[in-house]
Image (cartoon, rainbow, N blue to C red):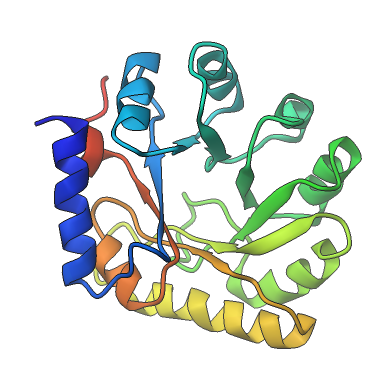
Amino acid sequence: MSVAANLASVRERIERAGGDLEVITLVAVTKGFGADVCRQALEAGLTNLGENRVQEAVDKMAEVSGAQWHLIGHLQTNKVRLTRGRFTLIQSVDSLHLAEAIAKVDPTQQVLIEVNVAREAQKTGVAPGQAIDLLVEMAGLLDVRGLMAMGPAHGDPTPAFQELRDLRDKAQQRLARSLPILSIGMSGDFEAAIAAGSTMLRLGRVLFGPRPV
């Protein structure tokens, strides 16, 4: 099937799950795929592309025009300088140290705070109990737009997704301002994320098929 056909199927599933396509942003995760797949995504109407590694993204940016790029993987501080002016949204900020490094390069950068609501050692993200304090500290450094998380590797992701939503709601109250983005939901769990209030889905396999080895 083509990317366009896969996208049509995804949109039907989103609507069946109660999602509003006018509210939910789809980030097409193109990590591991070549520039040709990025261009297919754009032709299908997917303008937000997600990459895990800064250098891979930068290489594709040189070949692909018209996209809004999201960094969704862990960002090392020694790569921060490469992000300047390149990413619409950095979704994976998980420490004050990293936030300060980004702010030195571009204090207007839009970011999300990644929270490890799955509580899995192999996942990055700030611990849930520290997330709101980190958000308050970062609010004066960068343009913090909301929270991001990955669901657990196994089992029902609903409790983790609901916890992230609750953290976002509490953070909004503490900051007395809106945090509009809740980036949860991937190819295997996006219906559960929609039920929990996701406003941004990060989808790869369901759009493009298995990632090349």
Q: Residue 73: percent from the left, percent from the top?
A: 53, 40
Q: Residue 112: percent from the left, percent from the top?
A: 63, 57
In the picture provided, is 129 more to the left or to the right than 139?
Answer: left
159 up-or-down from 30: above or below? below
Which residue is located at x 84 percent, y 40 percent?
Answer: 106
Quadrant position of the N terminus in the picture: top left
Which residue is located at x 90 percent, y 40 percent?
Answer: 104
Quadrant position of the C terminus in the picture: top left
7 up-or-down from 171: above or below? above
Q: Residue furthest left?
A: 1
Q: Residue 94: percent from the left, percent from the top?
A: 67, 55
Q: Residue 186: percent from the left, percent from the top?
A: 33, 53
User: In front here: 39 or 27?
Assistant: 39
49 up-or-down from 186: above or below? above
In the picture provided, is 100 more to the left or to the right than 203?
Answer: right
Residue 115 seen in this snapshot = no
**Residue 134 falls in image quadrant:** bottom right
Which residue is located at x 59 percent, y 77 percent?
Answer: 168
159 up-or-down from 85: above or below? below
Residue 179 seen in this snapshot = yes
User: In front here: 141 or 123?
Assistant: 141
**Residue 160 falls in image quadrant:** bottom left
Q: State the count of labels.
A: 0
Which residue is located at x 26 percent, y 61 percent?
Answer: 189
User: In front here: 7 or 72?
Assistant: 7
